[in-house]
Image: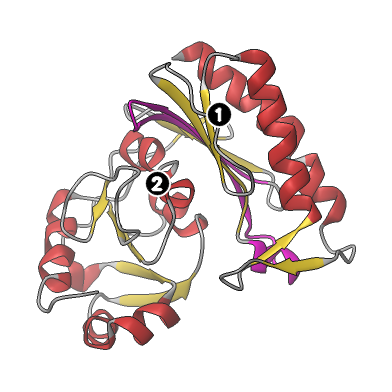
């Protein structure tokens, strides 16, 4: 896997220049059928990554957010989110990410997540994780009452699961609302203890897995099951198994959509 991780780091290092060239410069915004925004930078960035992967690993499949998937008979495929957090990107907030992961039979084996606006790059293979080359380790927090909890997509949780939203707002020592991949990276780095996420797509959540797990954390769906391309987009990451189980118990208290 070292060869694949090295290639992913090199490709994304070059690709990150595309969103940086457009960031805070004014850019045309389109909206997809689901009203989510997309820009020229999203598409140009994914095209660059896809072309580089095609040249380097022509036998591998490719799954991306902006273009049709490329299926092959190989067990390995790449999954891409060129700009995770397009709303952050178009509003000048530097918390957008670039996600690339290698899947084997649909299971995430390694990932690179870049934060171009912050100059940070996270990588992991499920056994170790690094940020800018330095090892990462999650916190030791085991009690929800002592935890820093991030709630991603809180507005959607409030809309679709208001009772769960209310319980989450009574839980933990500290709570913050956020979006996109960065809170999960803060968890891997030991700054955040848990993150509850909602309504994600496979290209949003599968690249999180090798980094969170590589830093010693736990990441699953809201039922405690491993994340796969078929998962429903509800994600829970936690620093320790004990903290993860307490949050699972809270999420299970009433059925969620």
Circle 1 residues within 10 Å: few <14, some 14–19, many ≥20: few
Which residue, as the protein is rendered here, is positioned at the far right? 25
User: Which of the image's four quarters has the N terminus?
Assistant: top left
Residue 225 horizontal/vertical position (percent): 18, 49
Q: Quadrant of residue 73?
A: top left
In this picture, residue 3 sits left or right of residue 198:
right
Residue 159 sits inside the magenta stretch: no
Q: What residue is disc 1 on?
A: 133
Residue 60 horizontal/vertical position (percent): 51, 19
Instruction: State yes or no: discs 2 and 1 in contact (Cβ < 8 Å).
Output: no
Circle 2 residues within 10 Å: few <14, some 14–19, many ≥20: many
Location of residue 105 with respect to 56 vertically, above or below: below
Q: What residue is disc 2 on?
A: 188
Q: Which range of residues does the magenta coloring cover?
A: 86-115
Frontmost residue, 200 versus 249: 200
Frontmost residue, 82 versus 240: 82
User: Which of the image's four quarters has the C terminus?
Assistant: bottom left
Frontmost residue, 118 versus 207: 207
């Amino acid at each position: 896997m070292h060869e694949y991780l090295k290639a992913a780091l090199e490709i994304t290092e070059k690709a990150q220049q595309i969103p940086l060239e457009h960031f805070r410069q004014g850019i045309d915004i389109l909206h997809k059928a689901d009203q989510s925004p997309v820009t020229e930078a999203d598409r140009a960035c994914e095209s660059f990554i896809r072309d580089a992967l095609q040249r380097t690993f022509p036998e591998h499949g490719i799954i991306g957010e902006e273009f049709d998937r490329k299926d092959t008979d190989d067990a390995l495929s790449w999954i891409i989110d060129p700009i995770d957090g397009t709303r952050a990107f178009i509003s000048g907030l530097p918390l957008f990410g670039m996600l690339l992961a290698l899947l084997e039979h649909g299971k995430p084996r390694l990932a690179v997540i870049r934060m171009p606006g912050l100059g940070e790059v996270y990588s992991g293979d499920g056994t170790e994780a690094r940020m800018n080359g330095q090892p990462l380790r999650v916190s030791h927090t085991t009690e929800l009452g002592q935890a820093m909890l991030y709630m991603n997509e809180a507005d959607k949780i409030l809309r679709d699961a208001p009772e769960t939203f209310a319980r989450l707002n009574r839980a933990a020592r500290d709570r913050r609302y956020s979006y996109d991949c960065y809170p999960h990276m803060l968890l891997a780095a030991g700054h955040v203890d848990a993150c509850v996420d909602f309504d994600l797509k496979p290209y949003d959540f599968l690249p999180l897995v090798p980094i969170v797990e590589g830093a010693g954390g736990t990441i699953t769906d809201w039922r405690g099951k491993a994340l796969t391309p078929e998962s429903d987009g509800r994600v829970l990451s936690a620093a320790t198994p004990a903290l993860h189980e307490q949050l699972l118990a809270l999420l299970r208290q009433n059925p969620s959509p």
